[in-house]
Image (cartoon, helix red, strand yellow):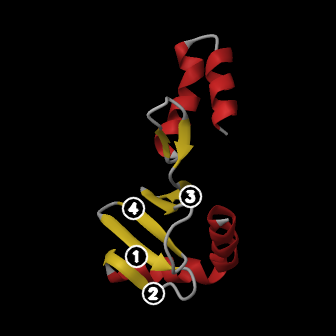
Amino acid sequence: MPDELEKEITDAKSVEDALPALECLLSNGYNVWTDGSLYFIKELVGRVNGLSLYIYPKDHPPPHFHIRGGGIDASFCIQDCSLLKGRIDPRHQALIKWWHRRAKSKLEVTWERLSS
């Protein structure tokens, strides 16, 4: 992906045309090494209603995902959607659990892909 972003910026005809690449860099977990190369620190799995869902590559067990935004900063176990860390109001937690039951296999696939 870094090579594609670099090409997109280089090929842009204007600053405005290059802005989607900047949006991708700022919102999708990239960082810059001391040698100037890009590296990936987290994957934005999705965004909904001001909340962002992330899975970090090569993160510590147990497999989990993070939800941030709207006053929420929490992590949940992929296996059973138990709250691992953070605080979340009961309404949002119930909605995340409802969603998790339907998206668990996709979360597992994403965790496996990023952990290998």
- Say which label, 1 or 4, has the lower sequence index: 4
Which of the 4 quarters of the picture holds residue 89? bottom left
Residue receiving disc 2: 82
Disc 2 marks which amino acid? Ser
Circle 3 or circle 1, nearest the eye: 3
The residue at the point 56 percent across, 55 percent down is 43
- Say which label, 4 or 2, has the lower sequence index: 4
Of the pair 58 and 7, the residue shown nearer to us: 58
Q: Are marks 1 and 4 in contact (CB under 8 Å)?
A: no
Q: Are marks 3 and 2 in contact (CB under 8 Å)?
A: no
Q: Position of residue 96 (x, y in %)?
A: 49, 77
Residue receiving disc 4: 68
Residue receiving disc 1: 92
User: Which disc is residue 46 wearing?
Assistant: 3
Which of the 4 quarters of the picture holds residue 106? bottom right
Q: Secondary structure at mark 2?
A: loop
* Quadrant for the C terminus in the image: bottom right
Query: For this view, does 84 lie left or right of residue 36?
Result: left
Disc 3 marks which amino acid? Gly
Query: For this view, does 95 lie left or right of residue 100?
Result: left
Disc 3: CA contacts within 10 A as few (<14), some (14-19) or many (>=20)? few
- Say which label, 3 or 1, has the lower sequence index: 3
- Say which label, 3 or 2, has the lower sequence index: 3
